[in-house]
Image (cartoon, rainbow, N blue to C red):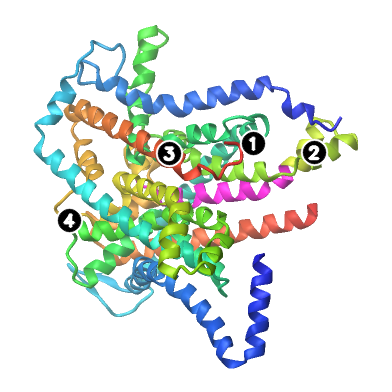
Amino acid sequence: MSDLSYIKRPNRPLQVYAVIFLIVLYVPILFIPLFSFNDSVYAKFPLTGVTTQWYVELWSREPMWAALWNSVKVGGVVSIISTILGVVAARGITRYRLPGKNALVTFIMMPLVIPGIIFGVALLVLMSRMGVPLSLYTVTLGHLIVCLPFAVATLLPRFEGFDKSMEEASADLGENGWWTFWRVTMPMVFPGIVASLLLSFTISFDEFIMAFFLTGTDPTLPMYIWGQLRFPQQFPSVLALSSLILFVSFFVVFVAQYLGRQGLDPDQ
Amino acid sequence: MTETSVSSTRKQRARNKGGLSGLLHRSENLRGYLLMSPTLLVMSIGILAPFLILVTMSLWTRDGFSFDTALTMANYERAWTEPIFGALLKRSFWISGIATVVTVALCYPMAYYVAFHVHRNKMMWIILMTLPFWTSYLLRVFAWKVILGYEGVINSGLMVVGLIEEPLEFLLYSREAVIITLAHAWAAFAILPLYVSLEKIDKSLLEAATDLGDGPVARFLRVTLPLSLPGIIAAAFLIFIPTTGDYITPALLGGPDGAMIGNFIQLQFGPVNNWPMGATLSIVLMLWVSAIALVFLFITRLAKDKIA
Protein backbone atom coordinates (compact mmCIF):
# COMPACT_ATOMS: atom_id res chain seq x y z
CA MET A 1 0.00 0.00 0.00
CA SER A 2 2.96 2.32 -0.28
CA ASP A 3 2.46 3.38 -3.87
CA LEU A 4 0.41 6.39 -2.82
CA SER A 5 -2.34 5.28 -5.12
CA TYR A 6 -4.53 8.30 -4.41
CA ILE A 7 -1.85 10.58 -5.83
CA LYS A 8 -1.37 8.52 -8.97
CA ARG A 9 -5.10 8.27 -9.54
CA PRO A 10 -6.40 11.10 -11.71
CA ASN A 11 -8.48 13.53 -9.68
CA ARG A 12 -11.36 14.54 -11.95
CA PRO A 13 -12.65 17.61 -10.07
CA LEU A 14 -9.15 19.02 -9.78
CA GLN A 15 -8.51 18.35 -13.45
CA VAL A 16 -11.65 20.23 -14.41
CA TYR A 17 -10.66 23.06 -12.09
CA ALA A 18 -7.21 23.23 -13.69
CA VAL A 19 -8.67 23.54 -17.17
CA ILE A 20 -11.14 26.24 -16.10
CA PHE A 21 -8.31 28.05 -14.32
CA LEU A 22 -6.20 28.14 -17.47
CA ILE A 23 -9.14 29.32 -19.56
CA VAL A 24 -9.88 32.17 -17.16
CA LEU A 25 -6.19 33.02 -17.14
CA TYR A 26 -5.89 33.25 -20.91
CA VAL A 27 -9.27 34.34 -22.27
CA PRO A 28 -9.14 37.95 -21.03
CA ILE A 29 -5.78 38.43 -22.71
CA LEU A 30 -6.88 36.72 -25.92
CA PHE A 31 -9.70 39.23 -26.36
CA ILE A 32 -7.02 41.74 -27.32
CA PRO A 33 -5.94 39.96 -30.54
CA LEU A 34 -9.56 38.95 -31.23
CA PHE A 35 -10.80 42.54 -31.32
CA SER A 36 -7.69 43.74 -33.10
CA PHE A 37 -9.01 42.01 -36.24
CA ASN A 38 -12.50 43.41 -35.76
CA ASP A 39 -13.83 45.78 -38.37
CA SER A 40 -15.16 48.30 -35.83
CA VAL A 41 -13.69 51.06 -33.70
CA TYR A 42 -15.44 49.59 -30.67
CA ALA A 43 -14.23 46.50 -28.86
CA LYS A 44 -17.63 44.89 -28.43
CA PHE A 45 -19.85 42.10 -29.63
CA PRO A 46 -21.12 41.28 -32.18
CA LEU A 47 -17.94 41.30 -34.25
CA THR A 48 -18.65 43.24 -37.44
CA GLY A 49 -16.09 41.75 -39.80
CA VAL A 50 -12.50 40.76 -40.21
CA THR A 51 -9.90 43.34 -41.13
CA THR A 52 -6.18 43.88 -40.93
CA GLN A 53 -6.44 47.63 -41.41
CA TRP A 54 -5.41 48.41 -37.81
CA TYR A 55 -2.18 46.55 -38.36
CA VAL A 56 -1.57 48.30 -41.67
CA GLU A 57 -2.20 51.63 -39.98
CA LEU A 58 0.54 50.93 -37.47
CA TRP A 59 3.14 51.07 -40.24
CA SER A 60 2.71 54.77 -40.78
CA ARG A 61 2.94 55.81 -37.16
CA GLU A 62 6.25 57.55 -36.68
CA PRO A 63 5.87 58.26 -32.92
CA MET A 64 5.07 54.60 -32.30
CA TRP A 65 8.21 53.45 -34.08
CA ALA A 66 10.26 55.96 -32.13
CA ALA A 67 8.76 54.66 -28.88
CA LEU A 68 9.41 51.09 -29.92
CA TRP A 69 13.02 51.91 -30.68
CA ASN A 70 13.36 53.63 -27.28
CA SER A 71 12.04 50.52 -25.55
CA VAL A 72 14.38 48.27 -27.50
CA LYS A 73 17.39 50.45 -26.66
CA VAL A 74 16.54 50.62 -22.95
CA GLY A 75 15.66 46.94 -22.82
CA GLY A 76 18.89 45.93 -24.56
CA VAL A 77 21.12 47.96 -22.27
CA VAL A 78 19.19 46.94 -19.14
CA SER A 79 19.25 43.24 -19.99
CA ILE A 80 22.99 43.23 -20.66
CA ILE A 81 23.93 45.22 -17.55
CA SER A 82 21.58 43.36 -15.23
CA THR A 83 22.77 39.99 -16.54
CA ILE A 84 26.44 40.90 -16.07
CA LEU A 85 25.74 42.22 -12.58
CA GLY A 86 23.57 39.18 -11.91
CA VAL A 87 26.34 36.80 -12.97
CA VAL A 88 29.00 38.33 -10.74
CA ALA A 89 26.57 38.62 -7.84
CA ALA A 90 25.36 35.03 -8.22
CA ARG A 91 28.96 33.89 -8.47
CA GLY A 92 29.89 35.81 -5.32
CA ILE A 93 26.87 34.47 -3.45
CA THR A 94 27.34 30.82 -4.34
CA ARG A 95 31.13 30.48 -4.52
CA TYR A 96 32.03 32.04 -1.17
CA ARG A 97 30.58 31.67 2.28
CA LEU A 98 30.18 35.27 3.17
CA PRO A 99 29.08 36.53 6.56
CA GLY A 100 25.91 38.57 6.17
CA LYS A 101 25.23 37.01 2.80
CA ASN A 102 21.52 36.48 3.43
CA ALA A 103 21.02 40.12 4.37
CA LEU A 104 22.72 41.19 1.14
CA VAL A 105 20.58 38.85 -0.97
CA THR A 106 17.47 40.16 0.77
CA PHE A 107 18.61 43.69 -0.04
CA ILE A 108 19.01 42.82 -3.73
CA MET A 109 15.56 41.21 -3.80
CA MET A 110 13.84 44.14 -2.09
CA PRO A 111 12.32 45.67 -5.23
CA LEU A 112 10.19 42.54 -5.54
CA VAL A 113 8.32 43.33 -2.35
CA ILE A 114 8.06 47.11 -2.26
CA PRO A 115 5.21 48.90 -3.99
CA GLY A 116 6.62 50.00 -7.35
CA ILE A 117 5.23 53.50 -7.07
CA ILE A 118 7.49 54.18 -4.09
CA PHE A 119 10.57 53.30 -6.15
CA GLY A 120 9.31 55.45 -8.98
CA VAL A 121 8.75 58.57 -6.91
CA ALA A 122 11.91 58.02 -4.83
CA LEU A 123 14.08 57.91 -7.97
CA LEU A 124 12.20 60.87 -9.41
CA VAL A 125 12.96 62.89 -6.28
CA LEU A 126 16.62 61.82 -6.33
CA MET A 127 17.06 62.77 -9.97
CA SER A 128 15.40 66.14 -9.59
CA ARG A 129 17.44 66.99 -6.47
CA MET A 130 20.65 66.06 -8.25
CA GLY A 131 19.59 68.12 -11.23
CA VAL A 132 19.61 65.14 -13.60
CA PRO A 133 17.09 65.77 -16.37
CA LEU A 134 14.60 62.95 -16.99
CA SER A 135 15.55 60.97 -20.08
CA LEU A 136 15.99 57.46 -21.34
CA TYR A 137 19.00 57.23 -19.00
CA THR A 138 16.86 57.72 -15.91
CA VAL A 139 14.36 55.20 -17.26
CA THR A 140 17.26 52.79 -17.77
CA LEU A 141 18.38 53.17 -14.16
CA GLY A 142 14.81 52.60 -12.96
CA HIS A 143 14.45 49.49 -15.10
CA LEU A 144 17.77 48.19 -13.86
CA ILE A 145 16.46 48.28 -10.29
CA VAL A 146 13.36 46.36 -11.37
CA CYS A 147 15.21 43.79 -13.51
CA LEU A 148 18.23 43.02 -11.33
CA PRO A 149 16.35 40.93 -8.74
CA PHE A 150 14.88 38.85 -11.55
CA ALA A 151 18.29 38.37 -13.16
CA VAL A 152 19.81 37.28 -9.85
CA ALA A 153 16.86 34.99 -9.11
CA THR A 154 17.21 33.38 -12.55
CA LEU A 155 20.98 32.95 -12.31
CA LEU A 156 21.28 31.83 -8.68
CA PRO A 157 19.89 28.31 -9.15
CA ARG A 158 22.20 27.87 -12.14
CA PHE A 159 25.28 28.75 -10.12
CA GLU A 160 24.07 26.79 -7.12
CA GLY A 161 23.35 23.80 -9.28
CA PHE A 162 26.77 23.10 -10.60
CA ASP A 163 29.50 20.89 -9.31
CA LYS A 164 32.46 22.75 -7.85
CA SER A 165 34.72 19.75 -8.39
CA MET A 166 34.67 20.51 -12.12
CA GLU A 167 36.30 23.84 -11.51
CA GLU A 168 38.75 22.29 -9.09
CA ALA A 169 39.66 19.66 -11.66
CA SER A 170 40.29 22.38 -14.20
CA ALA A 171 42.49 24.25 -11.75
CA ASP A 172 44.34 21.05 -10.92
CA LEU A 173 44.98 20.52 -14.61
CA GLY A 174 46.71 23.85 -14.77
CA GLU A 175 44.11 26.26 -16.10
CA ASN A 176 44.14 29.70 -14.56
CA GLY A 177 41.10 31.39 -13.11
CA TRP A 178 39.92 33.16 -16.24
CA TRP A 179 40.27 30.16 -18.52
CA THR A 180 38.52 27.98 -15.97
CA PHE A 181 35.68 30.45 -15.86
CA TRP A 182 35.53 30.78 -19.63
CA ARG A 183 35.85 27.09 -20.51
CA VAL A 184 34.23 25.31 -17.57
CA THR A 185 31.94 27.62 -15.64
CA MET A 186 30.57 29.62 -18.56
CA PRO A 187 29.24 26.72 -20.65
CA MET A 188 27.52 25.29 -17.60
CA VAL A 189 25.71 28.50 -16.71
CA PHE A 190 25.12 29.62 -20.29
CA PRO A 191 21.42 28.69 -20.48
CA GLY A 192 20.84 30.71 -17.32
CA ILE A 193 22.56 33.69 -18.90
CA VAL A 194 20.40 33.54 -22.01
CA ALA A 195 17.29 33.17 -19.83
CA SER A 196 18.33 36.17 -17.74
CA LEU A 197 18.95 38.28 -20.85
CA LEU A 198 15.58 37.45 -22.34
CA LEU A 199 13.62 37.87 -19.10
CA SER A 200 15.28 41.18 -18.24
CA PHE A 201 14.59 42.44 -21.73
CA THR A 202 10.93 41.43 -21.53
CA ILE A 203 10.44 42.97 -18.11
CA SER A 204 12.09 46.20 -19.16
CA PHE A 205 10.16 46.24 -22.43
CA ASP A 206 6.83 45.94 -20.59
CA GLU A 207 7.70 48.03 -17.55
CA PHE A 208 5.38 50.92 -16.91
CA ILE A 209 5.45 52.27 -13.36
CA MET A 210 9.12 53.35 -13.34
CA ALA A 211 8.84 54.71 -16.85
CA PHE A 212 5.76 56.69 -15.82
CA PHE A 213 7.75 58.73 -13.31
CA LEU A 214 11.15 58.76 -14.98
CA THR A 215 10.44 59.32 -18.68
CA GLY A 216 11.48 62.63 -20.13
CA THR A 217 10.43 63.64 -23.63
CA ASP A 218 11.15 60.23 -25.21
CA PRO A 219 8.37 57.79 -24.32
CA THR A 220 8.90 54.06 -24.12
CA LEU A 221 6.32 51.86 -25.83
CA PRO A 222 4.11 51.29 -22.75
CA MET A 223 4.13 55.05 -22.14
CA TYR A 224 3.06 55.59 -25.74
CA ILE A 225 0.22 53.09 -25.31
CA TRP A 226 -0.82 54.79 -22.06
CA GLY A 227 -1.03 58.08 -23.94
CA GLN A 228 -3.15 56.51 -26.70
CA LEU A 229 -5.61 55.00 -24.21
CA ARG A 230 -7.09 58.45 -23.66
CA PHE A 231 -8.51 58.52 -27.19
CA PRO A 232 -11.25 55.95 -27.82
CA GLN A 233 -10.81 56.16 -31.59
CA GLN A 234 -7.23 54.96 -31.10
CA PHE A 235 -8.43 51.77 -29.38
CA PRO A 236 -8.19 49.46 -32.42
CA SER A 237 -4.61 50.40 -33.22
CA VAL A 238 -3.70 50.02 -29.55
CA LEU A 239 -5.27 46.56 -29.73
CA ALA A 240 -3.24 45.70 -32.82
CA LEU A 241 -0.03 46.97 -31.29
CA SER A 242 -0.78 45.15 -28.03
CA SER A 243 -1.39 41.89 -29.89
CA LEU A 244 1.98 42.13 -31.56
CA ILE A 245 3.72 42.83 -28.26
CA LEU A 246 1.75 39.99 -26.67
CA PHE A 247 2.88 37.36 -29.12
CA VAL A 248 6.49 38.49 -29.19
CA SER A 249 6.58 38.52 -25.37
CA PHE A 250 4.99 35.08 -25.18
CA PHE A 251 7.50 33.69 -27.61
CA VAL A 252 10.56 35.24 -25.98
CA VAL A 253 9.52 34.25 -22.47
CA PHE A 254 8.67 30.74 -23.56
CA VAL A 255 12.17 30.31 -24.97
CA ALA A 256 13.72 31.95 -21.89
CA GLN A 257 11.80 29.75 -19.45
CA TYR A 258 12.61 26.67 -21.40
CA LEU A 259 16.33 27.45 -21.47
CA GLY A 260 16.35 28.62 -17.88
CA ARG A 261 14.89 25.43 -16.50
CA GLN A 262 16.55 22.99 -18.82
CA GLY A 263 18.59 20.48 -16.91
CA LEU A 264 17.36 21.85 -13.58
CA ASP A 265 14.01 20.11 -13.39
CA PRO A 266 14.29 16.41 -12.65
CA ASP A 267 10.97 15.82 -14.40
CA GLN A 268 12.37 16.81 -17.75
CA MET B 1 35.96 16.27 -2.23
CA THR B 2 32.94 17.69 -0.47
CA GLU B 3 32.50 21.33 0.30
CA THR B 4 32.92 20.91 4.05
CA SER B 5 36.10 18.89 3.77
CA VAL B 6 37.58 21.51 1.48
CA SER B 7 36.88 24.28 3.90
CA SER B 8 38.03 22.26 6.90
CA THR B 9 41.39 21.51 5.29
CA ARG B 10 41.58 25.16 4.40
CA LYS B 11 40.94 26.09 7.99
CA GLN B 12 43.55 23.61 9.12
CA ARG B 13 46.07 25.08 6.76
CA ALA B 14 45.18 28.51 7.99
CA ARG B 15 45.83 27.37 11.55
CA ASN B 16 49.11 25.69 10.64
CA LYS B 17 50.59 28.49 8.65
CA GLY B 18 49.31 31.23 10.90
CA GLY B 19 48.86 34.76 9.69
CA LEU B 20 49.49 34.56 5.98
CA SER B 21 46.98 31.83 5.17
CA GLY B 22 44.50 33.36 7.53
CA LEU B 23 44.79 36.50 5.48
CA LEU B 24 44.39 34.50 2.28
CA HIS B 25 41.23 32.96 3.67
CA ARG B 26 39.93 36.35 4.53
CA SER B 27 40.86 37.61 1.07
CA GLU B 28 38.77 34.73 -0.27
CA ASN B 29 35.78 36.35 1.44
CA LEU B 30 36.89 39.70 0.17
CA ARG B 31 36.77 38.40 -3.38
CA GLY B 32 33.20 37.27 -2.78
CA TYR B 33 32.20 40.71 -1.54
CA LEU B 34 34.10 42.24 -4.42
CA LEU B 35 32.07 40.17 -6.87
CA MET B 36 28.83 41.30 -5.25
CA SER B 37 29.88 44.92 -4.94
CA PRO B 38 28.83 46.23 -8.39
CA THR B 39 25.34 44.85 -7.89
CA LEU B 40 25.15 46.21 -4.37
CA LEU B 41 26.38 49.57 -5.61
CA VAL B 42 23.66 49.79 -8.25
CA MET B 43 21.02 48.74 -5.74
CA SER B 44 22.30 51.34 -3.28
CA ILE B 45 22.02 54.05 -5.92
CA GLY B 46 18.59 52.72 -6.84
CA ILE B 47 17.21 52.00 -3.38
CA LEU B 48 19.12 53.56 -0.50
CA ALA B 49 19.88 56.99 -1.91
CA PRO B 50 16.35 57.62 -3.19
CA PHE B 51 14.85 56.52 0.11
CA LEU B 52 17.05 58.79 2.15
CA ILE B 53 16.12 61.73 -0.02
CA LEU B 54 12.46 60.73 0.02
CA VAL B 55 12.47 60.71 3.83
CA THR B 56 14.14 64.13 3.86
CA MET B 57 11.68 65.58 1.39
CA SER B 58 8.74 64.24 3.38
CA LEU B 59 9.84 66.62 6.15
CA TRP B 60 9.77 69.63 3.84
CA THR B 61 6.72 71.59 2.82
CA ARG B 62 5.56 73.15 -0.37
CA ASP B 63 6.23 76.84 -0.65
CA GLY B 64 4.44 78.13 -3.68
CA PHE B 65 6.25 76.58 -6.63
CA SER B 66 9.34 75.57 -4.67
CA PHE B 67 10.01 73.79 -1.38
CA ASP B 68 10.49 75.09 2.12
CA THR B 69 13.40 72.99 3.32
CA ALA B 70 12.89 73.65 7.03
CA LEU B 71 12.31 70.25 8.60
CA THR B 72 8.81 69.85 9.96
CA MET B 73 6.33 67.12 10.71
CA ALA B 74 3.50 69.18 9.20
CA ASN B 75 2.89 66.75 6.31
CA TYR B 76 2.74 63.79 8.66
CA GLU B 77 0.28 65.66 10.87
CA ARG B 78 -1.86 66.34 7.84
CA ALA B 79 -1.65 62.71 6.75
CA TRP B 80 -2.68 61.66 10.24
CA THR B 81 -5.49 64.16 10.84
CA GLU B 82 -7.17 64.70 7.47
CA PRO B 83 -9.69 61.89 7.11
CA ILE B 84 -9.21 61.53 3.34
CA PHE B 85 -5.73 60.02 3.73
CA GLY B 86 -6.81 57.50 6.34
CA ALA B 87 -9.82 56.54 4.25
CA LEU B 88 -7.69 56.07 1.13
CA LEU B 89 -5.16 53.96 2.99
CA LYS B 90 -7.86 51.82 4.54
CA ARG B 91 -9.49 51.35 1.15
CA SER B 92 -6.16 50.44 -0.47
CA PHE B 93 -5.45 47.80 2.17
CA TRP B 94 -9.01 46.52 1.94
CA ILE B 95 -8.90 46.16 -1.85
CA SER B 96 -5.40 44.61 -1.83
CA GLY B 97 -6.32 42.34 1.07
CA ILE B 98 -9.42 40.97 -0.64
CA ALA B 99 -7.52 40.60 -3.93
CA THR B 100 -4.78 38.71 -2.08
CA VAL B 101 -7.21 36.33 -0.37
CA VAL B 102 -9.10 35.69 -3.61
CA THR B 103 -5.91 35.11 -5.61
CA VAL B 104 -4.32 32.74 -3.09
CA ALA B 105 -7.58 30.81 -2.63
CA LEU B 106 -8.01 30.37 -6.39
CA CYS B 107 -4.38 29.51 -7.06
CA TYR B 108 -3.94 27.02 -4.24
CA PRO B 109 -5.93 24.17 -5.85
CA MET B 110 -4.16 24.82 -9.13
CA ALA B 111 -0.69 24.64 -7.55
CA TYR B 112 -1.84 21.58 -5.60
CA TYR B 113 -2.95 19.90 -8.79
CA VAL B 114 0.37 20.42 -10.55
CA ALA B 115 2.44 19.49 -7.49
CA PHE B 116 0.53 16.31 -6.64
CA HIS B 117 -1.31 15.08 -9.69
CA VAL B 118 0.81 16.05 -12.69
CA HIS B 119 3.68 13.68 -13.25
CA ARG B 120 4.86 14.38 -16.74
CA ASN B 121 5.57 17.80 -18.19
CA LYS B 122 5.38 19.67 -14.90
CA MET B 123 7.61 22.33 -16.43
CA MET B 124 5.13 22.80 -19.27
CA TRP B 125 2.34 23.42 -16.77
CA ILE B 126 4.40 25.94 -14.84
CA ILE B 127 5.27 27.83 -17.99
CA LEU B 128 1.62 27.77 -19.08
CA MET B 129 0.49 29.16 -15.73
CA THR B 130 3.08 31.92 -15.59
CA LEU B 131 3.19 32.95 -19.25
CA PRO B 132 0.40 35.56 -19.05
CA PHE B 133 2.29 37.25 -16.25
CA TRP B 134 5.04 38.15 -18.68
CA THR B 135 2.82 40.23 -20.86
CA SER B 136 2.71 43.87 -20.01
CA TYR B 137 0.78 44.68 -16.83
CA LEU B 138 -0.74 47.57 -18.70
CA LEU B 139 -2.10 45.20 -21.35
CA ARG B 140 -3.62 42.86 -18.80
CA VAL B 141 -5.39 45.75 -17.13
CA PHE B 142 -6.43 47.07 -20.52
CA ALA B 143 -7.87 43.65 -21.36
CA TRP B 144 -10.20 43.87 -18.36
CA LYS B 145 -11.30 47.32 -19.46
CA VAL B 146 -12.26 45.76 -22.78
CA ILE B 147 -14.19 43.02 -20.95
CA LEU B 148 -15.92 45.02 -18.23
CA GLY B 149 -16.52 48.25 -20.14
CA TYR B 150 -19.90 49.88 -20.73
CA GLU B 151 -19.86 48.46 -24.23
CA GLY B 152 -17.42 45.77 -23.33
CA VAL B 153 -17.35 42.03 -23.89
CA ILE B 154 -19.70 41.10 -21.04
CA ASN B 155 -22.27 43.82 -21.62
CA SER B 156 -22.35 43.54 -25.39
CA GLY B 157 -22.27 39.75 -25.15
CA LEU B 158 -25.21 39.62 -22.76
CA MET B 159 -27.14 42.04 -24.96
CA VAL B 160 -26.52 40.02 -28.09
CA VAL B 161 -27.75 36.91 -26.29
CA GLY B 162 -30.72 38.94 -25.08
CA LEU B 163 -30.26 38.47 -21.35
CA ILE B 164 -30.15 42.21 -20.68
CA GLU B 165 -31.61 45.21 -22.48
CA GLU B 166 -29.30 47.89 -21.13
CA PRO B 167 -25.59 47.61 -20.34
CA LEU B 168 -24.83 46.93 -16.68
CA GLU B 169 -23.13 50.03 -15.37
CA PHE B 170 -21.71 48.62 -12.16
CA LEU B 171 -19.20 46.38 -13.94
CA LEU B 172 -16.60 48.99 -14.71
CA TYR B 173 -15.36 51.70 -12.35
CA SER B 174 -15.90 49.81 -9.12
CA ARG B 175 -13.86 48.20 -6.39
CA GLU B 176 -14.95 44.80 -7.65
CA ALA B 177 -13.50 45.55 -11.07
CA VAL B 178 -10.19 46.47 -9.43
CA ILE B 179 -10.20 43.29 -7.31
CA ILE B 180 -10.96 41.03 -10.28
CA THR B 181 -8.24 42.64 -12.36
CA LEU B 182 -5.66 42.46 -9.59
CA ALA B 183 -6.45 38.81 -8.89
CA HIS B 184 -5.98 37.99 -12.55
CA ALA B 185 -2.89 40.10 -13.06
CA TRP B 186 -1.03 38.77 -10.00
CA ALA B 187 -1.93 35.09 -10.19
CA ALA B 188 1.59 34.05 -11.19
CA PHE B 189 2.97 35.57 -8.00
CA ALA B 190 0.75 33.22 -6.00
CA ILE B 191 1.18 30.14 -8.16
CA LEU B 192 4.96 29.90 -7.96
CA PRO B 193 5.54 30.04 -4.17
CA LEU B 194 2.48 27.83 -3.56
CA TYR B 195 3.72 25.27 -6.04
CA VAL B 196 7.25 25.29 -4.62
CA SER B 197 6.06 24.72 -1.05
CA LEU B 198 3.60 21.99 -2.08
CA GLU B 199 6.18 20.27 -4.24
CA LYS B 200 8.61 20.16 -1.31
CA ILE B 201 6.24 18.23 0.94
CA ASP B 202 7.59 14.79 1.68
CA LYS B 203 4.97 12.43 0.27
CA SER B 204 5.78 9.76 2.85
CA LEU B 205 4.27 12.04 5.50
CA LEU B 206 0.96 11.81 3.67
CA GLU B 207 1.38 8.10 3.55
CA ALA B 208 2.02 8.02 7.29
CA ALA B 209 -1.11 10.07 7.90
CA THR B 210 -3.12 7.60 5.82
CA ASP B 211 -1.64 4.64 7.65
CA LEU B 212 -2.56 6.24 10.94
CA GLY B 213 -6.16 6.44 9.84
CA ASP B 214 -6.61 9.95 8.47
CA GLY B 215 -9.11 10.36 5.65
CA PRO B 216 -8.38 12.68 2.73
CA VAL B 217 -9.84 15.74 4.49
CA ALA B 218 -8.05 15.21 7.80
CA ARG B 219 -4.86 14.42 5.93
CA PHE B 220 -5.10 17.66 4.01
CA LEU B 221 -5.91 19.77 7.06
CA ARG B 222 -3.32 18.20 9.33
CA VAL B 223 -0.42 17.58 6.95
CA THR B 224 -0.63 19.30 3.56
CA LEU B 225 -2.09 22.65 4.62
CA PRO B 226 0.27 23.32 7.57
CA LEU B 227 3.29 22.25 5.57
CA SER B 228 2.37 24.55 2.70
CA LEU B 229 1.92 27.50 5.05
CA PRO B 230 5.27 29.10 4.11
CA GLY B 231 4.14 29.13 0.48
CA ILE B 232 0.82 30.69 1.41
CA ILE B 233 2.54 33.41 3.42
CA ALA B 234 5.04 34.11 0.63
CA ALA B 235 2.25 34.29 -1.95
CA ALA B 236 0.21 36.63 0.26
CA PHE B 237 3.18 38.97 0.70
CA LEU B 238 4.12 38.95 -2.96
CA ILE B 239 0.63 40.09 -3.90
CA PHE B 240 -0.45 42.27 -0.99
CA ILE B 241 2.63 44.47 -0.76
CA PRO B 242 3.01 45.55 -4.39
CA THR B 243 -0.74 45.91 -5.01
CA THR B 244 -1.28 48.33 -2.11
CA GLY B 245 0.64 50.92 -4.11
CA ASP B 246 -0.90 50.13 -7.47
CA TYR B 247 -2.38 53.02 -9.38
CA ILE B 248 -2.73 51.73 -12.94
CA THR B 249 -5.63 49.40 -12.23
CA PRO B 250 -7.59 51.88 -10.10
CA ALA B 251 -6.86 54.62 -12.63
CA LEU B 252 -8.22 52.58 -15.55
CA LEU B 253 -10.95 50.57 -13.81
CA GLY B 254 -11.55 51.97 -10.35
CA GLY B 255 -13.53 55.13 -10.89
CA PRO B 256 -13.91 57.51 -7.91
CA ASP B 257 -15.04 54.66 -5.68
CA GLY B 258 -12.00 52.52 -6.45
CA ALA B 259 -9.22 55.11 -6.23
CA MET B 260 -6.33 53.99 -4.08
CA ILE B 261 -3.48 55.68 -2.24
CA GLY B 262 -1.20 55.17 -5.26
CA ASN B 263 -3.43 57.43 -7.33
CA PHE B 264 -3.23 60.08 -4.66
CA ILE B 265 0.56 59.85 -4.46
CA GLN B 266 0.74 60.17 -8.24
CA LEU B 267 -1.52 63.25 -8.07
CA GLN B 268 0.87 64.92 -5.61
CA PHE B 269 3.76 64.42 -7.99
CA GLY B 270 1.67 65.40 -11.01
CA PRO B 271 -1.20 67.89 -11.17
CA VAL B 272 -1.26 68.88 -7.46
CA ASN B 273 2.50 69.47 -7.55
CA ASN B 274 3.07 68.99 -3.82
CA TRP B 275 6.09 66.70 -3.84
CA PRO B 276 6.77 66.84 -0.11
CA MET B 277 3.22 65.65 0.58
CA GLY B 278 3.65 62.89 -2.01
CA ALA B 279 6.91 61.87 -0.33
CA THR B 280 5.17 61.81 3.06
CA LEU B 281 2.35 59.64 1.72
CA SER B 282 4.88 57.23 0.17
CA ILE B 283 6.68 56.90 3.50
CA VAL B 284 3.39 56.46 5.37
CA LEU B 285 2.38 53.76 2.89
CA MET B 286 5.71 51.97 3.37
CA LEU B 287 5.47 52.17 7.17
CA TRP B 288 1.95 50.75 7.15
CA VAL B 289 2.87 47.97 4.75
CA SER B 290 5.88 47.04 6.90
CA ALA B 291 3.80 47.14 10.08
CA ILE B 292 1.10 44.92 8.56
CA ALA B 293 3.76 42.54 7.25
CA LEU B 294 5.42 42.29 10.68
CA VAL B 295 2.15 41.66 12.50
CA PHE B 296 1.25 39.04 9.92
CA LEU B 297 4.64 37.33 10.29
CA PHE B 298 4.31 37.39 14.08
CA ILE B 299 0.87 35.76 14.00
CA THR B 300 1.96 33.04 11.60
CA ARG B 301 5.03 32.34 13.73
CA LEU B 302 2.73 31.88 16.74
CA ALA B 303 0.43 29.62 14.72
CA LYS B 304 3.39 27.55 13.55
CA ASP B 305 4.68 27.10 17.09
CA LYS B 306 1.25 25.88 18.10
CA ILE B 307 1.21 23.30 15.31
CA ALA B 308 4.72 22.08 16.06
Which is more toward the observer, A147 or A229?
A147
Disc 4, SS: loop
Residue at (28, 34) in percent of width and height: A245
- Of callouts 1 and 3, the N-terminal one: 1
| Prevailing secondary structure class for the magenta stretch in the rendered image | helix
Q: Point out the residue furthest to the right here.
A: B212
> Circle 4 marks a residue in which chain?
A
Do circles 2 and 1 both sit on a common chain? yes
Could you tell me residue A268's position as x and y percent? 57, 36
Q: For mark 3, what is the residue?
A: B133
> Circle 2 marks a residue in which chain?
B
Report, in whole angstroms, how far the alpha carbon at label 2 lies from the one at label 3: 32 Å
Residue A249, disc = none
- For the question of whether residue B151 can be seen, the reply is no
Do circles 3 and 4 both sit on a common chain? no
Residue at (29, 61) in percent of width and height: A141
Report, in whole angstroms, how far the alpha carbon at label 2 lies from the one at label 4: 57 Å
Report, in whole angstroms, how far the alpha carbon at label 1 lies from the one at label 3: 20 Å
Residue B115, disc = 1
Disc 1, SS: helix
Stretch of the chain drawn in magenta: B225-247
Q: Point out the residue furthest to the bottom here.
A: B19
Q: Point out the residue furthest to the front here.
A: A173
Badge 3: residue crowd in 10 Å (few <14, some 14–19, many ≥20): some
Which is more toward the observer, B10 or B40?
B10
Closer to the camera: disc 1 or disc 3?
Answer: 1
Q: For mark 2, what is the residue?
A: B206
- Of callouts 2 and 3, the N-terminal one: 3
> Circle 1 marks a residue in which chain?
B
Q: Quadrant of the N terminus of chain B?
A: bottom right
Disc 3, SS: helix
Q: For mark 4, what is the residue?
A: A216
